[in-house]
C-alpha cells in the first residue's frame, strides 16, 4: 500500500490520499490500525527527506551551498532543507535529518564540558 504511493523515491500525495480514502470507506474492522500504521510510514518517509539546519546566525550563501551539497549527496536529491537561526547556540551548526544529528555547536560543547565536572 505504501509502495503504491511512491514514485521515483518521492511520496505521491494524491495516491496517498486516495489510498486512505479507500481504506476508510471500506469499513473493515481493523481499518483504523491500518491507517495508523500507514500514517506512521508516511511520517517516517517525510522525516528522512527533511533536514533542519540550525545556527547561531544567518549562514553565508557559500556555506549553505556546501552544506546542501553534502546533505544531498548523503541523503538524496529530494531532501528539503530548512534553515533556522538560534542565537542560544552561541556558534557552530546543528543539522538533523530524521534521527541523525550532527552537532558542532558551542552550546553543546559547553554542556558536555559541564557534565564532565
Image: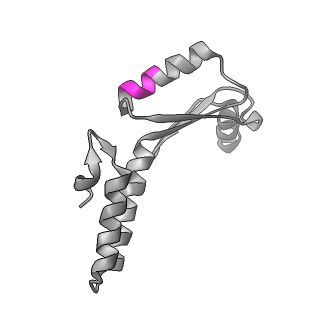
Between residue 113 and residue 99, name the one nearer to us: 99
- In this view, the residue farthest toward the bottom is 29
Between residue 92 and residue 36, name the one nearer to us: 36
Q: In which quarter of the image is residue 56?
A: top right
Q: Position of residue 49 (x, y in %)?
A: 42, 41
At 52% from the left and 18% from the top, the residue drawn is 65
Q: Would you say residue 70 sits in the magenta stretch?
A: yes
Q: Is residue 69 left or right of residue 20?
A: right
Q: Where is residue 115 in the image (x, y as percent from the top left)?
A: 67, 44
Q: Position of residue 11 (x, y in %)?
A: 34, 48
Magenta residues, dominant SS class = helix
Please tell me how many numbered marks the rendered image carries: 0
Q: Is residue 51 left or right of residue 74?
A: right
Examine the rendered structure and indicate whether residue 26 appears above or below residue 72: below
Quarter containing the N terminus = bottom left
Between residue 75 and residue 29, name the one nearer to us: 29
Q: Position of residue 34 (x, y in %)?
A: 31, 73
Q: Would you say residue 23 sits in the magenta stretch?
A: no
At 51% from the left and 17% from the top, the residue drawn is 66
Examine the rendered structure and indicate whether residue 64 appears above or below residue 83: above
Q: Which stretch appears magenta?
A: 69-73
Q: In this view, does 66 lie to the left or right of 115?
A: left
Q: In this view, does 11 lie to the left or right of 107?
A: left
- In this view, the residue farthest toward the top is 62
At 37% from the left and 33% from the top, the residue drawn is 75
Quarter containing the C terminus = top right
At 72% from the left and 36% from the top, the residue drawn is 86
Colour option used: one colour
Between residue 95 and residue 37, name the one nearer to us: 37
Q: In which quarter of the image is residue 29?
A: bottom left
Amino acid at each position: 500500500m505504501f509502495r503504491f504511493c511512491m514514485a521515483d523515491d518521492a511520496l505521491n500525495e494524491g495516491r496517498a490520499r486516495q489510498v486512505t480514502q479507500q481504506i476508510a470507506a471500506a469499513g473493515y474492522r481493523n481499518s483504523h490500525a491500518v491507517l495508523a500504521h500507514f500514517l506512521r510510514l508516511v511520517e517516517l518517509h517525510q522525516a528522512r527527506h527533511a533536514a533542519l539546519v540550525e545556527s547561531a546566525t544567518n549562514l553565508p550563501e557559500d556555506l549553505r551551498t556546501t552544506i546542501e551539497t553534502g546533505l544531498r549527496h548523503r541523503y538524496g536529491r529530494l531532501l528539503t532543507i530548512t534553515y533556522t537561526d538560534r542565537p542560544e547556540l552561541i556558534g557552530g551548526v546543528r543539522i538533523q535529518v530524521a534521527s541523525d544529528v550532527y552537532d558542532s555547536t558551542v552550546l553543546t560543547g559547553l554542556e558536555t564540558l559541564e557534565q564532565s565536572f
